[in-house]
Image (cartoon, rainbow, N blue to C red):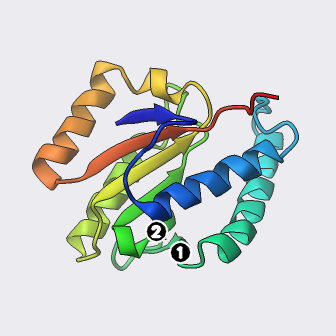
Amino acid sequence: MLCGRGDSVTNGPYLELLLQVVQRVADSTPGFFDIKGPGDGDRATNAFMKSLREELEEAVPFAKPEQCLCGENKLAVDFYLPPEGTIVELAFGLRNPTSEFERDILKALMAKETGCEVHRLVFVSKPGALKRHRQPSSQAIIKWAKQKHDLEIAFYEIKPSAT
């Protein structure tokens, strides 16, 4: 499923609330949509994630950040919503030809194999990711994950607010 601001990713109320908080934090972060490059971009992402975790702690307290769901290793997902069996990955580089797309899918599948309840992986991205992942290669991976592993993969693209 591909969608953006104003679209509904799923019927999960906790995911919808998490996405609203993500959008609100993005809207209140100056320069959020600017391309910054290595270094500056990493620092900006870290500051954004810190603000987001603080906001989510109050608004969606069971949105578990940095959960190691993949067994006896240090692989962690950005957020896990246990009541909905949903992993949320903030993947701001998803619009690029090389991204964490396949690695994040692998983490979700590893979590399923360890017995963690995972039904859905939602990528939250900046503009450009939806276009990039409509390509046949990404669509083939999404279809395979659904058919072989019953893993729904969805995208939510953060959009600049209309001000």
The residue pinned by badge 1 equals 64
- Image point (48%, 43%), residue name: 100
Q: Earlier in the sequence, mark 1 or mark 2?
A: 1
- Image point (46%, 23%), residue name: 132
Horizontal relation, residue 103 to residue 94: left or right: left
Q: Vertically, is 159 above or below 88?
A: above
Query: How far across and how far down the image is residue 54, in percent?
Result: 74, 71
Q: Residue furthest left?
A: 148
Q: Residues within 10 Å of mark 1 (few under 14, many from 20)?
A: some
Q: Residues within 10 Å of mark 2 (few under 14, many from 20)?
A: many
Which is more toward the observer, 129 or 17?
17
The residue pinned by badge 2 equals 80
Q: Vertically, is 95 above or below 6?
A: above
Identify which amino acid the numbered label 2 is placed on: Tyr
- Image point (40%, 60%), residue name: 12
Q: Is residue 123 in view?
A: yes
Query: How far across and how far down the image is residue 38, in percent?
Result: 75, 38
Q: Is residue 77 in view?
A: no
Which is more toward the observer, 140 or 84?
84
Horizontal relation, residue 2 to residue 139: left or right: right
**Label 2 element class:** strand
Query: How far across and how far down the image is residue 121, in percent?
Result: 37, 53
Residue 1 sits in which quadrant?
top left
**Label 1 element class:** strand
Measured in 3D between alpha carbons, the distance from the residue under mark 1 to the one under mark 2, in whole angstroms, is 5 Å
Q: Vertically, is 131 above or below 109?
A: above
Identify which amino acid the numbered label 1 is placed on: Lys
- Image point (66%, 68%), residue name: 56
Q: Where's the C terminus, which quadrant?
A: top right
- Contact check, label 1 and label 2, Cβ < 8 Å: yes
Query: How far across and how far down the image is residue 139, in percent?
Result: 28, 29
